[in-house]
Amino acid sequence: MNGKVLSYSAGSTSLDPYKFRVINDQQPSGKMQRLAMVFPELASFFGDPSQSLVIDAYPAALGGMESMTRVITYLHPPTCVRALRLAAAEKRRVVFIGQPLAGADLLLHAMETEMQWPTEILWATGGYPMPTSLQQCVKDWLADRGCELSVLKAYGVAELDHTLLASMEQDIELQPIYQLIDERLQLDQSMNATTMRFNGQVVANPDRIQKTGMGYHIQGDPSRYNHGVLRWLEQWQPSDWKRCTGYFAERDGEVILQRRLVRSVAVPGVVNRMSFEAMASLPRGTKCQPVCHFEFMADHGMSWLEKPKWNLQLFTQLAEERNRSAVSAAA
């Protein structure tokens, strides 16, 4: 292991000391070139490394970008702001690497400053599902600042590699359609596959990767992601995402949300509550209360290095209602 960079997944609960990836242990994978081949619209970001700047806000070390200039932010908002200003000053496109909630928070902090923005940002995100409502909000907010946003949703496995599959489009049900990026990955084509094969090694996988006519659908580990919660997040409005981080918990039958720290959420005269659309789509009779950023952390725990717990039991009702509706429609 001497001279190697070992990367543990920040989103994992495993304490096994040997559950790590070795960064750049093999020959360059050509992953960026493969992405540009599968998604031609990415050629401008990865074709000429001198024209892009990678702003890395990911909670684990990533490889495969050996030829690109990178700024490591360590999830520090002022460092991210300086990197964005550098890209604008050098007239470079930005490849912004960050998980959905942490990445959105960094960008919102940057929006609080008076600065010139890069003209193009590719947000490469992963780790857990990106709500389409959040993606559209950030896209609109950046467009107001003259910055065009594209989003690449990447799927990897902590101990194997990042960006094994990736998506830039979704179906009519807002599910991302993934394409195979890393040809070392082989997938069991059965509908209930719980394993995958990587470089000939069989690996357990709690997610469900299903083949479709256009690519792959990925259903996240049900112990982490409740369909009802994910459907509720799609009803969040721009005001909800500006006010709350997307981390929440359940307490005595009530949903407790974490408020943001950015200045724009403290608007005099505005009632501290969610939008009508978000409140109306809650399970019947459920109350919802945003609380102070640090109060939430003290009571429920929270770190940008941790994945959100989007599996509240309160939302099981929504998933059951959706299943009943699907059965009725099929009948």
Image (cartoon, rainbow, N blue to C red):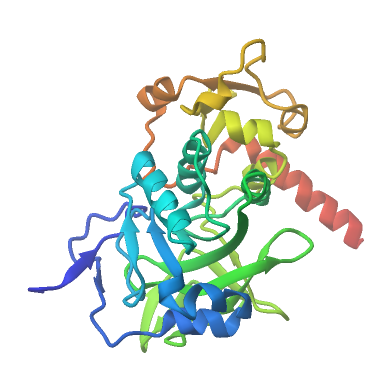
Q: Residue furthest top?
A: 269
Is 56 or 209 nearer to us in this picture? 56
Instruction: Let me know if residue 306 appears in the view.
Output: no
**Image-based side of 128 in relation to 178, left or right:** left
**Image-based side of 232 in relation to 24, left or right:** right
Residue 173: % across, % down? 76, 59
Using the rendered view, name the quadrant where residue 327 is placed.
bottom right
Instruction: Let me know if residue 258 appears in the view.
Output: yes
Quadrant location of the C terminus in the rendered image = bottom right
Residue 128: % across, % down? 50, 55
The residue positioned 56% from the left and 55% from the top of the image is: 129
Using the rendered view, name the quadrant where residue 179 is placed.
bottom right
The residue positioned 34% from the left and 68% from the top of the image is: 69
Residue 323 in the image: above or below residue 180: above
Residue 68 in the image: above or below residue 294: below
Residue 62: % across, % down? 33, 66
Is 138 or 115 nearer to us in this picture? 115
Residue 34 in the image: above or below residue 263: below
Quadrant location of the N terminus in the rendered image = bottom left
Residue 225: % across, % down? 55, 50
**Image-based side of 64 in relation to 320, left or right:** left
Is 318 or 141 nearer to us in this picture? 141
